[in-house]
Structures are given as C-alpha cells and as structure tokens.
Image: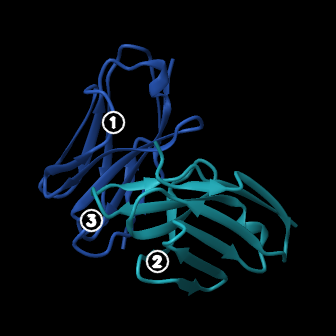
Chain colours: A cyan, B blue
Amino acid sequence: SQQGEEDPQALSIQEGENATMNCSYKTSINNLQWYRQNSGRGLVHLILIRSNEREKHSGRLRVTLDTSKKSSSLLITASRAADTASYFCATDAAAGNKLTFGGGTRVLVKP
Amino acid sequence: KAGVTQTPRYLIKTRGQQVTLSCSPISGHRSVSWYQQTPGQGLQFLFEYFSETQRNKGNFPGRFSGRQFSNSRSEMNVSTLELGDSALYLCASSLYFRGQGNEKLFFGSGTQLSVL
C-alpha cells in the first residue's frame, strides 16, 4: 500500500496560473519530499521538508507540511509549459527505512 | 559530476527468461535503491543496498534479487519473467544511508522492460 496519496490525480492549467497539489500520508514521518517526473524518465528531486518544518520555498515552488493533519501541499507559481510533468510526494517514515511514493499528480500546463 | 547511469535503456524479453539490469550511482554515493514503476501500481520499492549489504526490501517475490559491488555499482536480477514484470525499473542513489543524514534520492533514467 502507498503511504502518500496525491490529490488531484490530474490537473490542467494555463501557462502563468498557479498549480496546487496535495499529499496525504498515514504514519509519522521524518521528512516528506516532492519529485517531478517527465514522461518515461527518472524522477528529479524538487524539495525536502522535515517533520519539524512547516513551510519551505525553492524558486517558484512552495511546500507546506501539516503533521497534525498528515498532509502536505506543493504550489507551483506562474506555471510554464515546461512544468508539464507528474509530481510525486514521498515520505521517509519514522519507522522503517524506505522512501515511499504516492501515486502522483499529472500536471498539464497549456501554452 | 555524472548522474546515475542505468543500462540498458530498453529491454524486451519473453516469459520465463531472466534479466539483469545495471545501475552506476553518482560517484561517492554508497546507497542504491531500486523501484518498479507501472501504470497500475505506481512506484513500488524493491530493495536498498548500502556498502554491499541489502538494508531494506520491499514486498516482491524471491524472483527479484539484487546485489551491490564494492564500487557501489548495483545490479538487479529478475528470474522466470512474467508478463506482469513489464515496467520501468528505476535506480536511485543517495549520499547517506537513510536515517543518517541527507535522504535526497538521485534517479537514473530507468530501464524499460517489456515481457512478451
């Protein structure tokens, strides 16, 4: 079973708009990470947020973490066509050593 | 610095055959993880190696095995291939073993395996 579940499963927006996707998880975590995957390729690490952090920024990315609700959100501001990809959250659980990925959100940015 | 290299990029096999996939991590990375990605099951953790030792294993049958060499390069083997083994197999390396520091993973481009 997957630790993280992304919502929505798919998102279509116009270039310049913001894209928001959410991730919910079930157990306590050490950290939560977001990755991007372009079609049929490997994943690229975007940002890592630790359990004692509430918000992190990296360029046009903003990630929040609410450990009381066991949820995280990824916001991409001023989206570009190049942001078209699948986005995955991954949790590093407090118990166990594996990084567990959610099902992903497919984002389409239309020019 | 060269990234994670996976070979081959594409592979076509028939049921019952076996296959070996190779992964060369980023220089200096000692932890290597393998994931299977399919449209139906998403990204599933296979196993993780650190300093030639398997440190963690996912819920896959014994037909899936792996190993890591002293230079941190890793191979995974799938024996007696089944149609359901068709997937993108991804390898990822990291600088530290999880729980000891930076858990960020660097992924290769993957090996697309098709079982006919």
Tell me the residue that label 3 is attached to: B98
Residue A60 place in picture, x, y as percent: 67, 83
In front of the other: B18 or B51 = B51
Specify the subunit that label 1 lies on. B
Residue type, label 3:
Arg
Q: What element carries label 2?
A: strand
According to the picture, the residue beneath numbered tag 1 turns out to be B59
Placement of A70 over or under A59, stated as above or below: above
Marked residue chain, label 3: B
Tell me whether circle 3 and circle 2 mark residues in contact (CB < 8 Å). Answer: no
> For the residue carrying disc 3, how many other residues have a C-alpha within 10 Å: few (<14), some (14-19), or many (20+)?
many
Vertical position of residue B91 compared to residue B113: above or below: below
Image side of residue A38 versus residue A83, left or right? left
Q: Residue at x 40, y 71 (%)?
A: A31
Image coordinates of residue B83 in percent, x first then y, are 48, 19
Give the amino acid at mark 2: Ile
Relative depth, front residue between B84 and B15: B84
Q: Mark 2 points at which residue?
A: A49
Q: Which chain carries label 2?
A: A
